[in-house]
Image (cartoon, grey):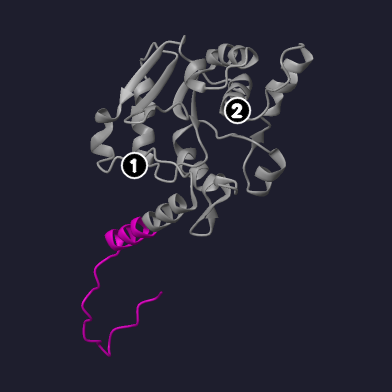
């Protein structure tokens, strides 16, 4: 897609903002890896993903390092002070708070370095939990010229969670589906519209039957 997928709107709000709002109550803080200026206009804090590339250039390592998810993750883990860090792509419109809570709970007591989901498409490194210590080996792999994230984490200790383990939270199997085409975006928008309508129907209170007015009774204050 030619457009920035994180800025695609759902109900008039960029998906990036929706995702930040979704996870804010569940984590200690939310930081976007991207343009700080652009994110500031959305009310979000951010760090640039060029930081790791610039550091590598200063150390006379290969220059073709900027951009891509590996650089973003390396930048995030270089800045964090949290032992565990939830890394999410910006184009996951079907994420739910229940699924994220479930993934976070999986890290409790885990001795692995990465808690990573696996679907029928393989490992999902852009919806996973990383220990802070993973930043250095990922940056080192990036400096060696590795560009595929699953290749970069192959030597790390992984706690792989299969989609069957969260099926009850995602019976349709689309919580980790992303958007790669305009058709994907339109389908996601239709899903959002259905879910929003369903929520409104679910929370709508039943109408009370009207009672005959008593002339002697005072009108209730509003």
Q: Is residue 12 left or right of residue 202?
A: right
Callout 2: SS: helix
Residue 199 is labelled as none
Q: Is residue 203 left or right of residue 100?
A: left
Res 70 → quadrant: top right
Residue 116, x across and y down, in percent = 40, 23
Q: Residue at x 29, y 30 (%)?
A: 163
Tell whether position 220 is magenta: yes
Q: Residue at x 21, y 86 (%)?
A: 212
Residue 145, x across and y down, in percent = 62, 16
Q: Nearer the viewer, residue 92 or 216?
A: 92
Tell whether position 15 is magenta: no
- The stretch of residues the image draws in magenta is 193-222
Q: Is residue 85 left or right of residue 79?
A: left
Q: Which residue is mark 1?
A: 174
How far apart are the two marked residues, 1 and 2, measured between alpha carbons? 24 Å
Residue 198, x across and y down, in percent = 30, 59
Q: Residue at x 34, y 62 (%)?
A: 197
Q: Which residue is mark 2?
A: 72
User: Does label 1 or label 2 sit earlier along the sequence?
Assistant: 2
């Amino acid at each position: 897609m030619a457009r920035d997928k994180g800025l695609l709107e759902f109900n008039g709000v960029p998906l990036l903002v929706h995702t930040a709002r979704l996870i804010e109550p569940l984590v200690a803080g939310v930081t976007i890896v991207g343009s700080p200026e652009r994110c500031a206009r959305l009310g979000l804090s951010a760090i640039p993903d060029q930081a790791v590339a610039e550091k590598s250039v200063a150390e006379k390592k290969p220059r073709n390092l900027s951009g891509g998810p590996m650089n973003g993750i390396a930048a995030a883990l270089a800045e964090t002070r949290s032992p565990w860090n939830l890394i999410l792509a910006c184009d996951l419109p079907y994420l739910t708070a229940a699924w994220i809570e479930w993934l976070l709970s999986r890290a409790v007591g885990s001795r692995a370095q990465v808690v990573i989901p696996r679907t029928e498409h393989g490992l999902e490194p852009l919806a996973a939990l990383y220990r802070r210590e993973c930043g250095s080996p990922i940056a080192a792999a990036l400096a060696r010229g590795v560009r595929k994230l699953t290749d970069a984490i192959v030597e790390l200790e992984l706690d792989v969670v299969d989609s069957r383990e969260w099926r009850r939270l995602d019976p349709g199997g689309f919580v980790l589906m992303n958007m790669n085409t305009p058709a994907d975006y339109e389908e996601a928008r239709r899903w959002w519209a259905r879910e929003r309508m369903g929520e409104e129907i679910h929370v709508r209170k039943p109408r009370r039957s009207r009672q005959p007015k008593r002339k002697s009774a005072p009108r209730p204050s509003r």
